[in-house]
Amino acid sequence: MEHKVLSSIREIVSLSIIGTLMLFFIAEIVLVQDVFFVHPVVVIAVTGIAIILWYRGQERRVT
């Protein structure tokens, strides 16, 4: 039972992080439409989303 609780808390945290990074990404696109420059926030957000999704995929393969 404890494993299920920890796993669901972990999933909620990872989904919250993914959601936050996606909001940064969307805000960056909306706020900088006329500038052809990728801000570091976008790079960090996209990289973070990719790493989290990769990690979740690896985790599901193991279990």
Image (cartoon, rainbow, N blue to C red):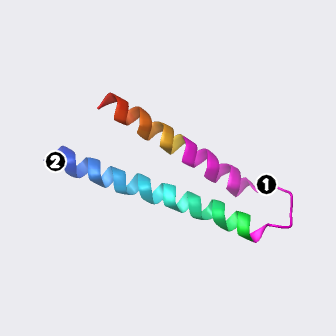
Callout 2, which amino acid? Glu
Q: Residue at x 43, y 36 (%)?
A: 57
Instruction: Decide whether the magenta segment is chiefly helix, strand or loop.
Output: helix
Residue 11 is labelled as: none
Identified at 79% across, 67% down, the residue is 32
Give percent across and percent down for residue 10: 34, 50
Q: Which quadrant is home to the C terminus?
A: top left
Q: Write down the residue under mark 1.
A: 38
Rendered image quadrant of residue 58: top left
Residue 57 magenta: no
The residue under the point 42% across, 52% down is 14
The answer to whether residue 36 is left or right of residue 50 is: right
Tell me where the magenta segment starts and ends, as one range: 31-50
Element under label 2? Answer: helix
Residue 59: where, in percent of width, then height? 37, 35
Describe the element under mark 1 as helix, strand or loop.
loop
Horizontal arrangement in the rendering, residue 8 relative to residue 53 (left or right): left
Residue marked by disc 2:
2
Q: Is residue 35 magenta?
A: yes
Q: Earlier in the sequence, mark 2 or mark 1?
A: 2
Near mark 1 (Cα within 10 A), the count class, few <14, some 14-19 or many ≥20, is few
Label 2, label 1: how far apart the Cα atoms are: 43 Å
